Amino acid sequence: MDNNADLTHAIIKPGETKLSDLADLLVSFRLMKENGEKTVADANQGILATEQLIVEKLQEEDLDGFTHDGKRFGPVVTSHPAIDKEKEPQFIEWLQEHNEEGIYKYTCHNQTLKSWWNLNKDKYAEEITEKGLLKVFEQIRISVRKVA
């Protein structure tokens, strides 16, 4: 099977499968996702810790890299700048003074927009959709909660 949708269709027979069986299948897929996310998080922590140990060992041995099992290992420096929110207006001004303002984008985080829409859709939906200002995709999901 190529993906979980194919797996689901292989397990169930439309019209013949009980809701309880589908519920068990849904819970199983959600647990699979949760476990996968934990596995990825654990792997990322392991990667970072191991990379740090390799960097320390390379410094100890005064090496700029090494080869092992047909693979080259060596440090790569990456920069991760962040704008100090308190200094953001000054930074924008500096960018403008240097004709670099094109890198700065006014954005609205997806979750912020979603929350705003849920609070204001009754008020603005008709006007916004008539003008084509937003594309709203609605999806029906199944809520799963433990019964007390």
Image: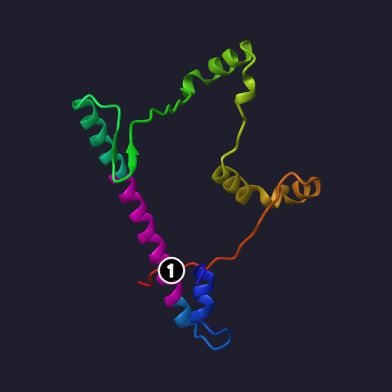
Horizontal and vertical percent for residue 98? Answer: 61, 12
> Which residue is nearer to you in this view: 130 or 56?
56
Is residue 53 toward the left or the right of residue 75 in the image? left
> Which residue is nearer to you in this view: 75 or 35?
75
Instruction: Name the residue type under label 1.
Output: Phe
Horizontal and vertical percent for residue 46? Answer: 28, 46
Helix, strand or loop for disc 1: helix
Q: Residue furthest top?
A: 97
Q: Residue at x 68, y 53 (%)?
A: 136
Residue labelled with disc 1: 29
Horizontal and vertical percent for residue 45? Answer: 30, 44
**In this picture, which residue range is highlighted in magenta?**
24-46
In the displayed structure, would residue 96 be above or below residue 73? above
Horizontal and vertical percent for residue 101? Answer: 63, 20
> Which residue is nearer to you in this view: 84 or 5?
5
Q: Residue furthest left?
A: 60
Name the quadrant containing residue 30.
Answer: bottom left
Q: Residue at x 30, y 31 (%)?
A: 65
In the displayed structure, would residue 70 be above or below residue 37? above
Name the quadrant containing residue 70.
Answer: top left
Q: Residues within 10 Å of mark 1 (few under 14, many from 20)?
A: some
Q: Quadrant of the C terminus?
A: bottom left
In the displayed structure, would residue 36 be above or below residue 121? below
In the displayed structure, would residue 30 be above or below residue 45? below
